[in-house]
Amino acid sequence: MASKKFLQLIPDDRFTVLNLGDMEIWDGADMALLRESLTRLIKAEKRRRIGIDMSHVKYIPSGFFGMLFDWFETGVQIRLYSPQPNVRRMLWFSQFFEAISPDCFALAPKPPETFPMEYPLEASRPERGSRLESKKLVARAAR
């Protein structure tokens, strides 16, 4: 029989921190509970600063970050508290979170790097001599 999971709210540093207890691996039911809780806190209770205690979490479903980013885009400030080392090594974590303190990380996407709108045609064509040299190098390697 499955036990009912409880979510604890902890006011901390002007943020409302959600704690899912000592669950190491979040599954779909945990994500649904978290999504429902965030929706209630943000829409019904008008909380704009949300934190999530990650001290026990070792695996996060792929939809977790997308859900946080969706709320972030509406103006909600998101923090993760005490994430485990394997969570900190995840690509999305390293790209989109910045350290506020040793155990607190804020969702703060960096602006995309600027790319030139046009690419000069002269730079895209290889020099005739360099192409010939490349062919000679390949032919010598094949011998």
Image (cartoon, rainbow, N blue to C red):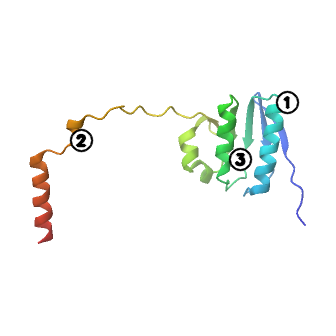
Q: Where is residue 75 in the image (x, y as percent from the top left)?
A: 68, 28
Q: Height in image: 1 above or below 5?
A: below
Q: In which quarter of the image is residue 3?
A: bottom right
Q: Can residue 88 be seen in this view?
A: yes
Q: What element carries label 3?
A: loop
Q: Mark 2 points at which residue?
A: 124
Query: For the point 57% across and 46% down, which residue is it?
Result: 92
Q: Is residue 19 visible?
A: no
Q: Where is residue 36 in the image (x, y as percent from the top left)?
A: 81, 44
Instruction: Give whichever of 71, 50 is nearer the camera.
Output: 71
For marks 2 and 3, the one nearer the N-term is 3
Characterize the local packing of mark 2: few (<14), some (14-19) or many (20 or more) Cα atoms within 10 angstroms: few
Q: Height in image: 29 above or below 34?
A: below
Query: For the point 81% across and 50% down, which residue is it?
Result: 21
User: Residue 54, which numbered label?
Assistant: 3
Q: Where is residue 48 in the image (x, y as percent from the top left)?
A: 75, 28
| Mark 1 vs mark 2, CA separation in Å | 55 Å
Q: What element carries label 1?
A: loop
Characterize the local packing of mark 1: few (<14), some (14-19) or many (20 or more) Cα atoms within 10 angstroms: few
Q: Name the residue under label 1.
A: 45
Q: What element carries label 2?
A: helix
Residue 54 is left or right of residue 118, and the answer is right
Query: Which callout, 2 or 3, points to the residue nearer the camera?
Result: 2
Query: Which callout, 1 or 2, points to the residue nearer the camera?
Result: 2
- Disc 3 residue type (three-letter): Met
- Disc 1 residue type (three-letter): Glu
Q: Quadrant of the C terminus?
A: bottom left
Query: For the point 25% across and 34% down, which residue is it?
Result: 120
For marks 1 and 2, the one nearer the N-term is 1
Pointers 1 and 2 in contact (CB under 8 A)?
no
